[in-house]
Image: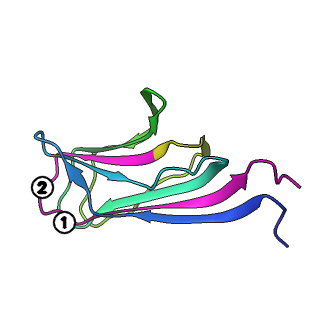
Amino acid sequence: MQEKGRLPLQDRAVNPSADASTSYELEFEPVKVGEMWYVEDLSFRDNTSSPSRIDCYIKGGGWDHFVGQRQPAVAGYVYTLDRPFWVGEDRKLVVKFVGGGATDELEAWATGWKWIKGEEG
């Protein structure tokens, strides 16, 4: 049975934004105001090439909060950041692939829980 105020979190990010330094960011949708995400597992992969490293962080609030990194990375391999962490309202979870190509196929998945403020059971 699901607890009041707690909903399953299963989100996916694709379609990266590129910068001039061959780094590509997958941004999840911002956490809605009034919610918090408890991410139990963050998984990610580059299906095309082998980036030199993959950085995971939370964007928002005037600064970025680093939550983990994997390096070096192998093409097609699913990497996991299995240390749980919170993402606050109006923040974005970001997975940055450093050293990839402009046409790389990138994916990231987050699983855990969404907590709705004011509905705690």
Amino acid type, callout 1: Thr
In space, the residues marked 2 and 1 are separated at their CA atoms by 8 Å
Image position of 99 (left or right of 85): left
Q: Secondary structure at mark 2?
A: loop
Expressed as whole percent of the image width and height from the top left, the position of residue 23 reads 20, 44
Report the residue at 81% width, 69% height from top.
2
Specify the amino acid type for callout 2.
Answer: Gly
Frontmost residue, 88 versus 43: 88
Residue in the image at 82% along x and 54% along y? 119
Q: Do tag 2 and tag 1 residues touch (Cβ < 8 Å)? A: yes
Magenta residues, start to end: 93-121
Specify whether 78 is left or right of 119. Answer: left
The dot on residue 48 is 1
SS label for mark 1: loop
* Residue bearing the label numbered 2: 101
> Quick one: label 2 or label 1, which is nearer the N terminus?
1
Mark 2 Cα-neighbour bin, 10 Å: few <14, some 14–19, many ≥20 = some
